């Protein structure tokens, strides 16, 4: 039995894995309107200034600021109204000293003008002129050419995930296509003679496959395209065949194996023989999730996750999601996980040298947020369904006292 | 000019709106595998116990616990091995006193057995019997029938958003379809003579439409189906026609209007005439975003957002996303917005009676997180592109001192 001959801490496991796994993001052209949540493979550059013409930020009168210096309610400046700038048009007037033109919010400032006086600070003098009741400084109420973004400026960095406003910023300068990192293909392999598809009625001793679905959805959220490999029976040839096909056709392979020793040994043997460098970690000092296998073969990442759903999800977040981000050219640990602070409802013991991940429910009691541990066995999917988040107890901790403040990472 | 005759605080505006807007979530059948992030309209109930048979959590020997009482390394209990339970099969043996059967992790416990002894705590005695080196308590290493979830138990509440593990929990009990709230249709109307589609080259005085796209993406994320209405020219008949069609065919209508007074007056007049009760708020004491119109007509929600992108996004988060959640039967303010604590890099003044939303960039300086305000004009989309999040300064605050800790709500 090759059981746990390479048990590593979570950090050491990641370090060793990332020394051997160096995927290069592959750029592909994506329409910006379809690129929400995609990661940039090439940094886009503004092709022109934005705005390309000086714009007014208010409704009022475009002026030469010098013409308004010293103007006040008691001593207004008189200016001749020589036109109105229509929205969406070039200004068809140019101001000379003593002249002004009506402008609307967002409209173009006419040549010769260098400021806008708000309509509230003016008064009609007669048919053709106005009184300016307040001096305007040069540039006041004007967005200058290139003030939003300058021609040639890098808009966003490589590895950035596009948010709604980023899509807006790209479209604003006419960029309608970006080079995004291709989403890695991630093979999802479930194994076990007892596992059947979820739409079937289990016979005695059988259970429905759920890991294929939860892991696929987690992979999708993390930025990958899941490739379902179905349920592989507990026979070495079958598992070997599926893994070989997965390594050939996908970038990352996730096995959700049974938890019995014979299954684990079989997964270990199969992963070992897929190629170099092979198995890098066999067992991680974490609970739940110790019987995890990490491997790299032919440049592909291979994760043998425990079959029980709680362990599978904890290990996915810890290892597989960061591997997907490596593939996307993003900071592997940079995925923002929403967290809240809460008080622990009861003491949790832990063992030094083991990182514990405790599923918790959040409850508000007399105005304070409390984290209530859910001590279901990690074989129970409803431990996760009932949980709002997870509390991590570090490797060197002996546990956490009742009432202590803890950080809860929320399940999204 | 009907300008701002009903300026309300953000809270009062929402309260007034929610008194008049009472959408009923409409259930529709959705395949569970496609239901990630959908909101439940009907609470699903477990059709059977999970698991349906007692399962072992370890590799070892199923026993009658009473047979092992007092067993130890020095005084082992001897048991006859009468069979092995195959994975995915009913146990084909039943234990009588003094008997045991081999079981694997996840396998069925045979009738007569009430505990499992880990293989590590046993030793082969001879061909047909083992020594048990440690007593087992009743139920030890066994998942009982219904321990994960019980038949008839409500699995998740109405209004719950499905997470990956919820999909797993539903599939585990064979629920492959749920009744989810239909995604509301949200009309997105951009207006302005100066606005052109983003794939066109703007002439002098023209700008590209970006709000249609950012607002559509925000709506999609919030759980709605955006319906693009294109760019409507600045003519009353055109706007009226678009709004009427939107109210007839959609659940929520969002206008991203120009910001000039004439535009705002026109939006106000058009919304006023769409039906009862009409305009509920005209102006909100918030910066940016004051010139916002909130209306309800014929049971539909109508939001006239300022045309500038920063205001439009702030107001979308504040009002439109909660309205979408009302429509989905979810807690309107319950959307989790990830937040971090950071120190403010410079003092921000504010006026009492106005809620300020300051866009900030996050920076790490000597190990501390700092929020650096981006004081771009709210007309600039790049204010949002450069921002990592937003700091809210409450209505009654006169500002925040440099170095103070603030809560930053992150842009996702």
Image (tube, coloured by chain):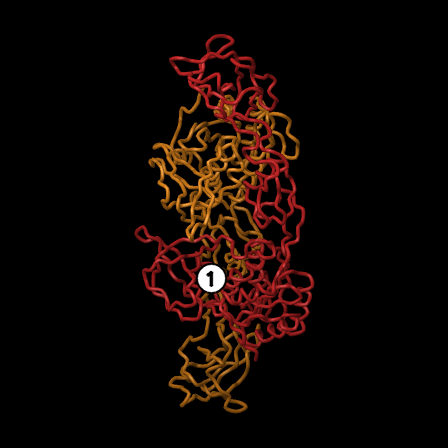
Chain colours: A red, B orange
Measured along the vertical axis of the image, is residue B265 above or below residue A398?
above
As rendered, which of B383 and A303 lies closer to the eye? B383
The residue depicted at 51 percent of the width and 67 percent of the height is A12
The spot of residue B122 in percent (x, y) is: 47, 84
Q: Is mark 1 on a helix, strand or loop?
A: helix
- Which class describes the residues within 10 Å of circle 1: few (<14), some (14-19), or many (20+)? many
The residue depicted at 40 percent of the width and 78 percent of the height is B137
The spot of residue B173 in percent (x, y) is: 52, 61
Measured along the vertical axis of the image, is residue A67 above or below residue A17?
above
As rendered, which of B387 and B239 lies closer to the eye? B387
Measured along the vertical axis of the image, is residue B234 above or below residue B152?
above
The spot of residue A391 in percent (x, y) is: 42, 60
Residue placed under numbered mark 1 in the picture: A382
Instruction: Kindly give the residue lying farthest to the top in the view shown.
Output: A126
Q: Relative to residue B241, is residue B201 drawn left or right? A: right
- The quarter holding residue A231 reads bottom right
The spot of residue B189 in percent (x, y) is: 56, 31
- The quarter holding residue B225 reads top right
Measured along the vertical axis of the image, is residue B238 above or below residue A302?
above
């Amino acid at each position: 039995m090759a059981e746990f001959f390479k048990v590593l801490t979570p950090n050491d496991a990641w370090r060793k894995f990332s020394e051997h796994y160096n995927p290069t993001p592959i750029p592909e052209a994506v329409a910006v309107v379809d690129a929400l949540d995609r990661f940039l493979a090439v940094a886009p550059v503004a092709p022109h200034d934005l705005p390309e013409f000086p714009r007014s930020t208010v409704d009022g009168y475009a002026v030469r600021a010098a013409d308004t210096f010293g103007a006040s309610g008691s001593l207004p400046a008189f200016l001749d109204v020589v036109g109105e700038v229509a929205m969406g048009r070039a200004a068809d007037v140019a101001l000379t000293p003593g002249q002004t033109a009506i402008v609307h919010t967002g409209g173009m400032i006419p040549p010769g003008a260098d400021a806008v006086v708000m309509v509230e600070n003016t008064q009609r003098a007669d048919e053709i002129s106005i009184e300016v009741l307040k001096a305007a400084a040069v540039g006041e109420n004007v967005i200058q050419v290139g003030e939003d973004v300058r021609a040639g400026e890098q808009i966003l960095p490589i590895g950035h995930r596009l948010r709604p406003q980023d899509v807006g910023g790209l479209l604003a300068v006419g960029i309608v296509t970006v080079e995004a990192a291709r989403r890695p293909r991630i093979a999802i392999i479930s194994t076990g003679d007892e596992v059947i598809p979820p739409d079937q009625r289990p016979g005695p001793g059988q259970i429905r496959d759920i890991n294929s679905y939860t892991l696929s959805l987690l992979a999708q959220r993390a930025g990958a395209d899941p490739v379902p490999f179905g349920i592989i029976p507990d026979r070495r040839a079958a598992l070997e065949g599926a893994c070989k096909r997965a390594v050939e056709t996908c970038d990352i392979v996730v096995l959700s194996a049974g938890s019995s020793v014979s299954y684990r040994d079989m997964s270990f043997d199969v992963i070992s023989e897929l190629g170099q460098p092979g198995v890098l970690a066999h067992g991680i000092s974490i609970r739940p999730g110790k019987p995890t296998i990490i491997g790299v073969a032919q440049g592909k990442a291979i994760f043998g996750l425990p079959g029980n759903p709680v362990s599978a999800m904890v290990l996915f977040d810890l290892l597989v999601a960061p591997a997907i981000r490596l593939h996307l050219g993003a900071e592997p640990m940079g995925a923002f996980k929403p967290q809240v602070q809460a008080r622990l409802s009861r003491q949790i013991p832990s063992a030094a040298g083991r990182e514990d991940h405790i599923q918790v429910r959040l409850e508000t009691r007399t105005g304070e947020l409390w984290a209530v541990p859910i001590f279901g066995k990690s074989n129970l999917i409803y431990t996760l369904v009932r949980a709002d988040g997870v509390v991590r107890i570090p490797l060197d901790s002996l546990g956490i006292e009742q009432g202590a403040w803890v950080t809860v990472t929320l399940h999204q």
